[in-house]
Amino acid sequence: MAGRGASRLIQAGFLAGLVVVWYLATTRWGVNRLLLPNPVAVYDNLSDILRSGEFIGDLETTLGELAAAFAISATGGITLGYLISRSRYWIEVFEPLFAAVYSIPIILFLPLFVLFFGLGPASKIALGASISFFPIVINTIAGFGHVDRLFVTAARSMGASDYHLFRHVLLPAASPVILTGLRMGFTTALLSIIGSETLASLAGLGHRIVHLAEAMEMARMFAYIVFVIAIAVTLNAVVSRLEAHGKRD
Amino acid sequence: MAIAVPKRRPALRSLAQRPWLTRLIVIAVLFALWEVAARFLVDPLFLSPPSQVIASLDKVFDTRGVPAALQLTLFELTVAFVLAVAIGLALGLAIGLQPLVRRSFFPIVLLLYGMPQVTILPLFILFFGIGAASKIAFGVTHGVFPVIVTVVAGVQNLKPILLTGARSMGASRWQIFRHVIFPHMVPSFFAGMRLAMSGVLLGVLLAELYVSIAGIGYFTTLFTQNFDPTKLLGLIGVLAAMAIVLNAVVRRAENHFARWRAE
Amino acid sequence: MATSEAAIRVRGVFHRFGDEGEQRFVRALADTSLDVAAGELMCLIGPSGCGKSTLLNIMGGLMAPSAGTVEVRGQPVRGPLPRDIAFVFQENSLFPWNTVIENIELGMTFQGVSKSERAARAAEALAAVGLKEFAQHYPAQLSGGMRQRAALARALSLKTPILLMDEPFGALDEQTRMILGEDLSVLLAQSRKTIVFVTHSLGEAVFLADRVAVFSARPGSIKQVIAVDEPHPRRPEFVTSAKFTSLRNQLYGLLHDEIRKAVQQSTAPGAGAEPA
């Protein structure tokens, strides 16, 4: 239909227009370079960062914190979620509790973690794990908790042991929901880590951006922003792919 | 599997019938653990027991500048929320009502919605300064996207038969919008408002915590650097309570206005 | 009894969806002509996909035909005619966020009835369909049969001379259909509206109609029009009479082959069938 081509055209036109306006604003219209850097300068900085490998240290820090936080929240969340899901009663007790806590911005507690763990990676890992714990545990409870009783009854009537039941009935039935929870947990962990690095840190990608902002190195800061967004988008895309792939089976 | 249920003691049975009571007990137990850990296990430089935190709340409020900072934060939250909802509604309708506009711009909206906005927090502060404007702006950018997305969805999934019926009865375009499209979209809109409140809370508080030379951020930094967990926990507690209340208010409004969605 | 003046005049209507060569191309109607007399109840019956709903929408101005003309009360139809024609659809078309009475009043708002008259007309229409106690209910709180009564009340409140009903009882169970059919017959005896009623059900067609137009399989055209000479309101005993059975059998004979043809069409590969 004519519509599809037209909308793509408009999209491309809109985005191209934005870039053009950006370029003109900084070069012709006299927007202060201290506010908005020249897009060409941003591009140059980005190439420089990538070529020189300057980003590696911060990237390692951030990804390391992410991996640790996610590992903790995933194991903790799934384990606790499974244990709670074994009883209807405990599901009813805990589920609203988790939902209520998750509804407040837990990043509020960052100063506490910094007080406790200092400005190093430990506070970021602790916060990231705390925040990403909730979508994982909530989804795990939902996944295991809503397995059709019929399947359980059928398996038991055929003599399935606890282990069999878990591995061949509960786990496959619950995994789509759990995978979604893991994806949400991962995305949340990434956001929290970058956020906490921005707020209170000595290293990592978030900190790097703050550092450049304070030094008013606008072009380089923009370059890092683009870099971090690209990393985040890529990681999220990979995780979504994994989720979809896991669900397919 | 029907097996004989052993007779429970009356106390346990009444608990079994009241999960909310057990929930309260769980919360109480957690507080008790906190109390014990803070009193006996952890250096008081790092953690304070809840009894002390609550007792010292007045000292937190007495600290010069804290009440003002809290009021300012509440003000920023309210303004950001209203702006996010208004802008989101306007943009959502503009995008949702015209198929070509929707096909062109909705993917862009979704892209921006999924972006890690915290990356550009320092930029916002540079652009808008350390005052309320940057906090409000950052809150708005977090809160506006869920509203746009839910409004577009609400306009989209209108059953065609309802439009046909209205047309057959002679409804004008304006009447169709006011009496068919708009009321249909309202429940989605309120769900979007709930998400907008979460977003605005996140955005405003992030911005506040980032700016360590004024507002709430000043005091959290101050209490942290002075190793004063009592006041820090008190302040954070008040903010958390604020967040819970605001969320509850919006959820109430959502339940009230989505009455007819009987599913 | 029907007068000789035609309320609706359909002449040579053809309709196709899509263009030739497209996957969705289908010839819905071919050379359909029909006169509906003022004050009569005309049933349109035919196999699935024969175009009867399409014809109804064209009659009501919701669609423009690919070829041919439709005149309502002497005027050519160019769009919806809210003052002449009211619809009742098979799907639930009540607005779920409004109560029953709000739905009815909204219909009148669209038509342009003045505010002062709306309340009285709404109450009247609700009483006519027997839903007076349910005025403040939401559609979700009503059964399927009650929802269609409410939709009918909304159509009646518009006080149009013509009513177009597209399988209004199609989604309901047989017992509800029976009751609603009897009630409809009583209502119509009192009001003398012109009604065009699309249905799948042979029994319903014979029970309600003054004349039944039988459609052929797609592309639909009118194969034959049968008259049912029985005064309104139709008594429930009519259903068990010999006349009823003979008419029903007649319809069955006309329809059976068309139904077979329609089933073959839907299972055969490729786009719309060419006329025989």
Image (cartoon, helix red, strand yellow):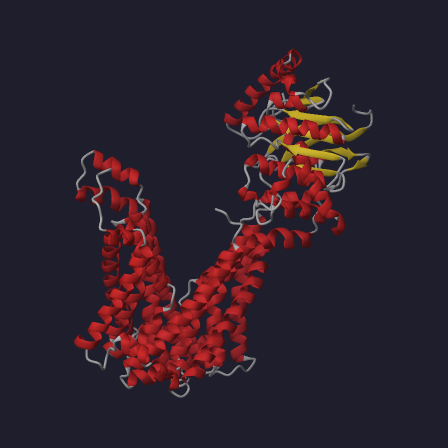
Estimate the x, y position of residue C97 in percent, counting from the top left.
57, 49
Between residues C184 and B19, which one lies in front from this camera angle? B19
Residue under the point 28% across and 38% down:
A151
User: Tag count in the figure?
Assistant: 0
Locate the N terminus of chain B by quadrant: top left
Q: Is residue C262 left or right of residue A145?
A: right
Which residue is outermost to the bottom? B64
Q: Is residue A11 above or below residue C188?
A: below
Q: Residue B154 location in percent, x, y? A: 53, 53
Q: Please indicate whether residue A152 sits to the left or right of residue C180 in the image.
A: left
Q: Residue at x 54, y 77 (%)?
A: A25
Looking at the picture, tell me which residue is in the foreground, A24 or A169: A169
Relative to A167, say whether B229 is above or below: below
Q: Position of residue A144 (x, y in %)?
A: 28, 48
* Camera-nearest residue between B146 and B102: B146
Query: Image point 18% across, 35% down: which residue?
Result: A159
Depth check: A176 or C27 in front?
A176
Residue C79, percent from left and from top: 73, 42
